[in-house]
Amino acid sequence: MLRAKLDNDVKLFLILEAAYIGAVESGKITKDLALIIHGSKLGQDKYLITEEFTDTMAEELKDELSC
């Protein structure tokens, strides 16, 4: 999203934002967000590691671009 902001590319920003929101709404979140939601009793099944989240974002982005 930073690249979109630096380039003042509103369309790219909106596409990336929609992909991110889609991932979060489907429950696919990183540990930092999961800690906020679930607190100290956080199980590893409640969040994705970086590589998994990156893969999820790639799929969400493909979906957004195909619309």
Image (cartoon, rainbow, N blue to C red):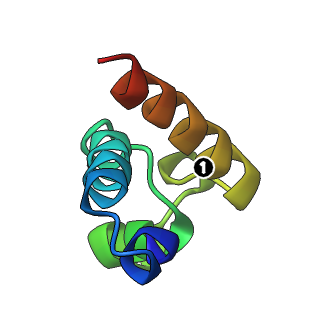
Name the residue nearer the viewer: 55 or 36: 55
Q: Quadrant of the N terminus?
A: bottom left
Residue 50 placement, left or right of 34: right
Query: Quick one: label 1, few (<14), some, or many (20+) residues within 10 Å?
Result: some
Residue 34 placement, left or right of 52: left
| Residue at the spot 51% in from the left edge and 72% down from the top edge | 3
Q: Quadrant of residue 36?
A: bottom left
Q: Secondary structure at mark 1?
A: helix
Total numbered circles: 1
Q: In the rendered structure, which amino acid carries the disc numbered 1? A: Phe
Q: Quadrant of residue 40?
A: bottom left
Q: Residue furthest top?
A: 66
Decide: is 33 above or below 18.
Answer: below
Name the residue nearer the viewer: 24 or 17: 17
The residue that label 1 is drawn on is: 53
Name the residue nearer the viewer: 4 or 64: 4
Q: Position of residue 64 (x, y in %)?
A: 35, 29
Q: Quadrant of residue 4?
A: bottom left
| Residue at the spot 50% in from the left edge and 26% down from the top edge | 62
| Residue at the spot 38% in from the left edge and 52% down from the top edge | 16
Residue 25 placement, left or right of 36: left
